[in-house]
Amino acid sequence: MKYFKNHIVVFVFFLLIGFFYINQKFTIIKDLDYSENKEKDKRPEMNINRLDYYPNQFESYFRDNFSLRGYFIKYMGWIYRHIWEKSPKPDGVIIGQNNWLYNVDKELDCFNGKRNFNDEQLNIVLHEFLYRKRVLDSMGIKMLVVLHPTKYAVYPENLPPFMNSVPKISSAMQLMNCIKDSSDIKIFYSRDILIAQKKKHDLFYKGDNHWNDLAGYYVAKEIVNQVDLGIPEIPLTKFCTDTIFNSAGNLALMMGNAEEYAETRIKYRLCENDAIPFERFKHIAPENVVYTGEFQKSFKSDNENLPNAVIIRDSFGDALMPYLQNSFHYSTFIWDGWNYGFNLEIIEKEKPDVVIYMILESIIPNIYTNGLSKNWN
Amino acid sequence: MLFSSLVFLYIFLPVTLLVYYVINPKLRNSFLFLASLIFFAWGGVSYSLILIISIILNYVIGIQINKRHRRKTWLIAGIVLNLAFLIVFKYTNFIIENVNSAFNWLEIPTVKNPKIILPIGISFYTFQSISYLVDVFRKTNDSQKSIINLGLYIALFPQLIAGPIVRYHDIQKQINQRIHSVDKFQQGIKRFIIGFAKKVIIANTMGYVADQVFALNVDSIVPLFAWIGIIAYSLQIYYDFAGYSDMAIGLAKMFGFDLLENFNFPYVSKSIKEFWRRWHISLSSWFRDYLYIPLGGNRLGNGRTILNLLIVFFVTGFWHGASWNFLAWGLVHGFFLIIERTRFGYILDKLPSFVRSFYTLFIVVMAWVLFRAENLNFAIEYYKVLFSTGSSEFDYFQLIKILNYETIVVFIIAVFGAMGGFMQIKGLLIKLLDITRLSVQKIELLKDLVYVCFMIFVLLYGTGSLVIDSYNPFIYFRF
């Protein structure tokens, strides 16, 4: 009996510490599919001149390619959520009421007024937009600045109980008030439109920090209205919907057990969509742009009477595209890596009738840090 | 390489164990030495050279000390050389920073700081090397004839990075001849798993809480957070260090070695003196045997005893780290150890047990502020927050990060364990099992089955924690 009991501990121990490496080599159990915001590290090559770096590189490779990593992520996510009732990524996701997830990165600080401009920064950003307006005016191009709200600003009531749900003055409000008080630049904060609509519709995904296509529709409609170029309004009835079941948002993926937060997404597209991808000019993404494939998206619609537009956007701009691409003859959407720069070279080539800067409020400070033009002052 | 890393658990350990038990037993020491060098090199390949040079120097000096002539000269040379390594690699930055501060004050041009990176484990293997030389000098042991065996003593991977500090005379016989058995191996596994659980489940969770608080600007820490932070840190440092020692002892057992215990429930101590008999036992024993007693210990009168204690705790503080914080931490402990030798100690002994426990815990926890703070200024400000009424407004987001079901449950387990609660439960269960009419073998099997379940849970949960920490979901996956 003693022989048996000694061996059972040793056997199980060796089974546990040996199994994962063997499975990694021979795939006895197949891993789950999951996606990450990086390519898995490749096995490093041993270079005698760079030996000091090898251990860290190998550790990173081994961790990224650890056997059954997908299962570990899924079940640890479940344990965190259901046993500990907390986010497995507490610095990344807040679990709100009714399974509403909120993105922490920059958005929480923005909501709490911790990413605001000081007077000097605000003045510099004001002058940047005055400069852009001046240059665009000289070219006969209109300019519109649209500040997009985060999920916190539209749905603060779903934050966890006791957490501050009263929005503080954010950098968006600072910038809008400053520009409205000091210039004739057209600017609006799309939060107000969404708050007016949210009683009738859900406008953000529960498991994602992004808004949905319906929110995109209402904001795009207001943009076209504000541009004031006589563009006809497209009623919602002209849109058809495609339903995507069990789609997990970016925050749901961060929770590890994405299917638990999977929800139905309704994609809006114009039933008689006449806009097609069309690049009159090919613009090269600067080196610091992360998603180069998203840098330029250009469309052409059949109606030559419509004006042309260059739209500087971020990921929130995605939901606006079905509407906007059909509201302009040529439309070019630029995602410059959250810099919201002037992008004058692109504008000079495209010669649009209007330039629209769509900026997510939590990333507005990027204009000051990365988006200033060389000649702004 | 860390014991709580995936590469160690799932590559290094199984491969090393497998090769160790498959090869000719005569080659085991050589292989274990080689494995230890690889283990060490994993944390900094270049620094392996320092370790190898240290082994060669101590080997040569040990042989010279063993000869009849100029033994003391060789011993002094050996100690000076070992300490020189330690001072150069651990204290140069600190010395230059302070010299430069003085130069700045005197408006003298400053010296360039070479920013030397601290080689891992140097404090531990330096002390082991000195222990070897002193033991040979005292003729407690002969010098080691085999450089491989001496290398194995200095670099044995289970205790190389964070101890326990093994004194040469405690392990010399085991290097040449040790017992390997399945029973000992499974004891080693059990100990290793307990250590792994302490480290990955308790210390890491408490560490996260402490890090959240100590990462805040001291102005924005409210008293509630400050208390949570320092209590969490007190538990983190104990479980981190004791867990590592458990893993070291367990691993050593798997390779046939018996290392001495390093912790014995230090937080149940009723005086600072008792605390140091229970905390990092191998270090306090080392200082007692190789510093305090050679300085005269308590044999030369009260004044000299106080001075000796101050010296020991001054060195203990600096041994832990090259900064004024650690020095202050050491001196706080030294101060209370000294006053416990006065009438205060007499009064303390008369007080109820819970008062003595509270006094000890309070001093120890307060001293940990010095240990954890980035600098003395931060520590002073932190103390002010701890004892202020402060603002009651706090950031709820921070609060849910540090106070949630996980941290609360782990905290309760940690406190219960640190106070010896699990040992009491174990005793009770054994008594209960005795009442049953099960045979001894069945009871043993039942215990092991429970243990196997515990092992599976700990390894899988620990591995999951390590994997999920590196999980980087695709935020903008739609693009």
Image: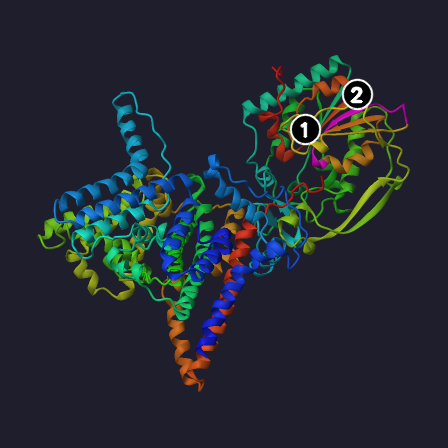
Q: Quadrant of residue B217?
A: top left
Q: Secondary structure at mark 2?
A: loop
Q: Nearer the viewer, mark 1 or mark 2?
A: 1
Quadrant of the rendered structure where residue A280 is? top right
**Closest to the observer, A14 or A275:** A14
Which numbered marker is on residue A217?
A: none
Q: Quadrant of the C terminus of chain A?
A: top right
Chain containing the residue with disc 1: A
Q: Measuring 56% from the left and 45% from the top, which residue is drawn there?
A: A61
What chain does badge 2 belong to?
A: A
Q: Determine if the magenta segment contains residue A20.
A: no
Is residue B327 visible from the viewing direction of this image?
yes
Mark identifier at residue A352: 2
Q: Position of residue A17 (x, y in %)?
A: 52, 60
Residue type beneath disc 2: Pro
**Which numbered tag is attached to residue A336?**
1
Q: CA distance from mark 1 to mark 2?
A: 18 Å
> The residue under label 1 is which amino acid type?
Asp
Q: Residue at x 78, y 15 (%)?
A: A140
Q: Which segment did they paint magenta? A: A303-316
**Image point 66% across, 25% down: which residue?**
A286
Nearer to us in this view, B11 or B468: B11
Is A178 above or below relative to B166? Answer: above
**Image x and y of residue A19, in percent:** 56, 60
Q: Number of callouts in the render?
A: 2
* Rendered position, B413 above or below B224: below
Q: Secondary structure at mark 1?
A: loop
Q: Position of residue B306 (x, y in %)?
A: 15, 50
Residue B210, above or below A367: below
Instruction: Answer left or right for B191 relative to B461.
Output: left
Callout 2 crowding tier (Cα within 10 Å): few <14, some 14–19, many ≥20: many
Residue A68 in sight from this viewpoint: no
